Image: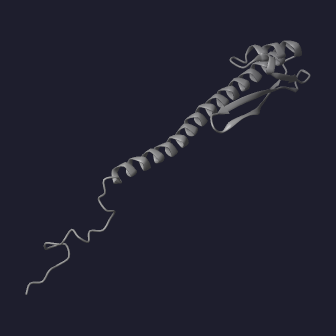
Amino acid sequence: MTASYAGTGPGRDRFRPGPPALPGVRHQERGAAVVEFALVLTVLILLVFGIAEFGRAYHASIQLTHATREGVRELAVTGDQAAAVVATRGAAGSLDPALLDVTTSECTPGLETTVHATYPFTYSIPMFGSATLTLDSQAVMRCGG
């Protein structure tokens, strides 16, 4: 009498664990892969567009900060509020000057003056929607006199 061990002998493949080797199994696996790819691709697209929109918003914020610095410099040197507003709008770069809201304070020699600007930034991410953020910047400088 000989001992037979699991996995050896003539009937070793009879009780192999796992799904049965049927003709349609490969087709079902391919369908599952397509569904998984669609789910992963959706998240990946959201991520890529989100990063791009964040970059646009950050660029607009930097442009707004630069514009308020230029405006307060003009106000501190000349003391002219209208010229400061024009300088702020002119330095806004890629921002739409018509949407830029600029307010200035009075320039008294030896005291600080401020230029405050706001800009509505609209972002849009596919399958997520769009919204408007209000970007805000303020610059302060001492008036020259």
Q: Is residue 61 above or below residue 43?
A: above
Q: Is residue 21 above or below residue 93?
A: below
The x, y position of residue 30, in whole percent, is: 38, 47
Which residue is found at the position 48% from the left and 47% from the top? 35
The x, y position of residue 42, in whole percent, is: 54, 41
Front residue (pair 126, 8): 8
Front residue (pair 133, 62): 133
Q: Quadrant of residue 110?
A: top right
Give the number of callouts: 0
The x, y position of residue 16, in whole percent, is: 26, 68
Which residue is found at the position 13% from the left and 74% from the top? 9
- In the image, farthest residue toward the bottom: 1
Q: Does residue 56 appear in the picture of this structure?
A: yes
Q: Quadrant of residue 141?
A: top right
Which quadrant of the figure contains the N terminus? bottom left
Q: Quadrant of residue 51?
A: top right
The x, y position of residue 93, in whole percent, is: 69, 17
Which quadrant of the figure contains the C terminus? top right
- In the image, farthest residue toward the front: 23
Front residue (pair 81, 42): 42
Front residue (pair 131, 63): 131
Which residue is found at the position 12% from the left and 83% from the top? 3
Going by the image, does 134 lie left or right of 7? right
Going by the image, does 89 lie left or right of 37? right
Going by the image, does 8 lie left or right of 105? left
- In the image, farthest residue toward the left: 1
Q: How is the image coloured?
A: one colour
Q: Does residue 80 appear in the picture of this structure?
A: no
Going by the image, does 29 lie left or right of 4? right
